[in-house]
Image (tube, grey):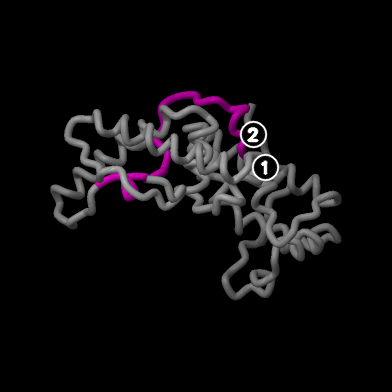
Amino acid sequence: MKRTLRRAPAVRPTPRDDLEPRNDRELVYAARVGDDRAFDALFYRYRDGVYRLSLAITKDPQAAEEVVLDTFARAYRALARLEPDDTLRPWLYRVAINESYDRRPRGVAQTPLDLADELAMPDDGSPARMAERAEDRRVVLAAVGSLDDKHRTVVVLHYLNELPLAEIGHIVGAPVGTVKSRLHYALKALRVHLAQQPGFHIEPAGRSAATGEK
């Protein structure tokens, strides 16, 4: 049964909207007293990130759209008790992860995750190399999908949504050291997997920007 959000944001904020400079705490407090535009601003600020995260976990575009709706529906119902600092993102992403795990993969749908830039050789811009890069992305997507939930989640949060390690730890409920360890293990597993793929070229293992480990 497809779920719907009873109250959908009505106005898309623009970069010139006077709400845009306000932090999430200010927007939550404004929405709490009936300012619909404030909740709209939160929705459009984090909609894409929630969708990308859910799509990477569920591998199902329709399920990811449902997760977006359900995540913000929960946020709207929880306005009276939400007390974010400057950002609501960790709370939203925790909800999205839980909602996504409730919708296990229902088919084979590629996600937009592109770790090829981290793991593959630089692109020289030629048509042949562009075609090769497209195949690289397909292979990388399959490799990421082979990771277990806890390792795939930190990879998606760090490389797809570009979150800092401390915030990832807050979202997944783990110390920063554990997040680093999971990223290190995940990248090592990805390199091993990708090194076995015919014609896939990866750089030699070196300094990891995420973990600082060799």
Residues marked 1 and 2 touching at CB (< 8 Å):
yes
* Identity of the residue drawn at 80% across and 54% down: 83
Residue, disc 1: 71
Q: Secondary structure at mark 1?
A: helix
In the image shown, does 22 or 16 lie closer to the viewer?
22
Mark 1 packing: few (<14 Cα in 10 Å), some, or many (20+)?
Answer: many
Please say whether residue 130 is one of the residues in the magenta stretch: no
Image quarter where the C terminus lies is top left
* Identity of the residue drawn at 65% across and 52% down: 89
Q: Is residue 44 left or right of residue 136?
A: right
Along the polypeptide, which appears first: circle 1 or circle 2? 1
Which image quadrant is residue 73 in?
top right
Amino acid on which the number 1 mark rests in the picture? Thr
Disc ID at residue 26: none
Q: Is residue 143 left or right of residue 33?
A: left
Q: Is residue 11 left or right of residue 54?
A: right
* Identity of the residue drawn at 30% across and 43% down: 205
| Magenta segment boundaries in residue numbering | 95-120
List x then y, in percent, for residue 155: 47, 41
In the image shown, does 14 or 193 lie closer to the viewer?
193
Alpha carbons under labels 1 and 2: distance apart: 8 Å
Residue, disc 2: 99
List x then y, in percent, for residue 106: 49, 24
Q: How many marks?
A: 2
Q: Is residue 31 above or below residue 47?
A: below
Amino acid on which the number 2 mark rests in the picture? Glu
Q: Is residue 155 above or below residue 37?
A: above
